[in-house]
Image (tube, rainbow, N blue to C red):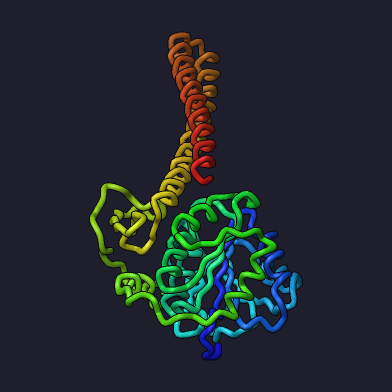
């Protein structure tokens, strides 16, 4: 990346419902854009790397999967690959399979925060459609370091969680239609960036360094809570920020309150499915025992086993009803 001090680094985050807005944004970016574009889309670890090809065909700029150690180049789009965080360090891309952040890998917050730490006011951040609040903290950090933030108009978003959370976290965020975002990027790329607006944040620097340079588990800053990590079940430490609470375990998994609530809902749902499976197996075993006892004429045993089978069936029905309720509540929590 060259040294002209315009806003020449654009970081973009999207999740559910975000592919089409990404395509629209990329299709409207002009050739020769004087900015680099880095993209994080939440995908499963087993997903392919098709997004770079989709974006490459959508507009005039070359789009490629991110590669570790590659210098950031103006006029290029680099896309985070599945199951790897994408960060910025000393003007280069950095890929890592470090701990999940907000339950995601790649995570938008890590890209946004590392970009703000590295390029300061030269960063422009965009948050598109998605659930929960990944990217919100990163937008606040970008703004605090003198950068600018825009979000997709929630009224046009398939999922409103991410843009709404980002707009709340960054007071100066502009809410724009998808078709307006490319023009906003171009304006930012032609706007001289001010001098760095924030003093160095040593705690944030230490947090980012744990992903840039793998480290052994350590006790996080903050107060030990009675909560456990949804990812590894380790104890969580609470950090209080100006606008949010974060929870981090010794391994390094880090959660916003909203993301942790969703993570625990997923853990509870898995546990309920295991319980349902075990109860169904017990039901089938009891039915075999009833048939065997009846064949031998053991009427007392048949009655006792039939009562156990009834209780097991009722317990399974109760847990199934509870699982369905929690699934609905988890969906509502993400809006």
Mark yes or no: residue 168 visible.
yes
Q: Nearer the viewer, residue 241 or 68?
A: 241
> Residue 311 location, x and y as percent?
45, 19
Mark yes or no: residue 45 visible.
no
> Residue 91 location, x and y as percent?
49, 84
Horizontally, residue 207 falls left or right of residue 225, namely right
> Residue 210 location, x and y as percent?
36, 72
Horizontally, residue 273 falls left or right of residue 43, namely left
In the rendered image, the vertical position of residue 260 relative to residue 97, given as above or below: above
All told, the count of numbered labels is 0
Q: Residue furthest left?
A: 223
Q: Residue at x 45, y 15 (%)?
A: 307
In the rendered image, the vertical position of residue 140 relative to residue 132, given as above or below: below
Q: Residue at x 54, y 33 (%)?
A: 324
> Residue 329 location, x and y as percent?
50, 37
In the rendered image, the vertical position of residue 297 relative to residue 108, given as above or below: above
In the rendered image, the vertical position of residue 42 relative to residue 313, given as above or below: below
Residue 25: quadrant of the picture: bottom right
Q: Residue at x 43, y 14 (%)?
A: 304
Q: Residue at x 55, y 88 (%)?
A: 1
């Amino acid at each position: 990346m060259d040294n002209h001090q315009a806003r020449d680094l654009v970081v973009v985050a999207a999740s559910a419902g975000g592919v089409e807005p990404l395509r629209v944004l990329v299709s409207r970016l002009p050739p020769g854009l004087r900015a680099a574009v880095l993209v994080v889309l939440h995908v499963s670890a087993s997903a392919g790397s098709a997004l770079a090809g989709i974006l490459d065909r959508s507009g005039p700029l070359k789009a490629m999967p991110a590669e570790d150690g590659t210098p950031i180049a103006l006029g290029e789009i680099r896309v985070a690959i599945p199951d790897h965080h994408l960060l910025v360090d000393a003007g280069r891309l950095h890929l890592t399979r470090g701990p999940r952040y907000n339950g995601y890998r790649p995570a938008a917050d890590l890209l946004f925060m590392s970009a703000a730490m590295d390029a300061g006011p030269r960063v422009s951040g965009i948050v598109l459609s998605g659930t929960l609040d990944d990217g919100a903290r990163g937008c606040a950090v970008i703004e605090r370091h003198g950068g600018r933030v825009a979000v997709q108009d929630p009224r046009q978003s398939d999922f409103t969680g991410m843009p709404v959370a980002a707009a709340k976290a960054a007071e100066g965020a502009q809410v724009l239609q998808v078709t307006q975002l490319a023009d906003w990027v171009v304006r930012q790329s032609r706007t001289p960036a001010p001098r760095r607006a924030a003093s160095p944040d040593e705690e944030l620097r230490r947090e980012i360094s744990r992903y840039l340079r793998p480290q052994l588990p350590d006790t996080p800053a903050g107060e030990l809570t009675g909560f456990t990590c949804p990812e590894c079940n380790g104890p969580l430490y609470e950090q209080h920020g100006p606008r949010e609470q974060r929870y981090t375990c010794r391994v390094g998994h880090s959660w916003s309150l909203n993301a942790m609530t969703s993570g625990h809902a997923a853990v509870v749902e898995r546990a309920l499915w295991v319980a349902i499976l075990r109860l169904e197996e017990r039901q089938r075993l009891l039915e075999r025992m009833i048939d065997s006892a009846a064949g031998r004429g053991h009427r007392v045993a048949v009655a006792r086993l039939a009562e156990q089978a009834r209780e097991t069936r009722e317990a399974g029905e109760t847990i199934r009803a509870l699982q369905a309720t929690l699934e609905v509540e988890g969906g509502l929590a993400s809006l």
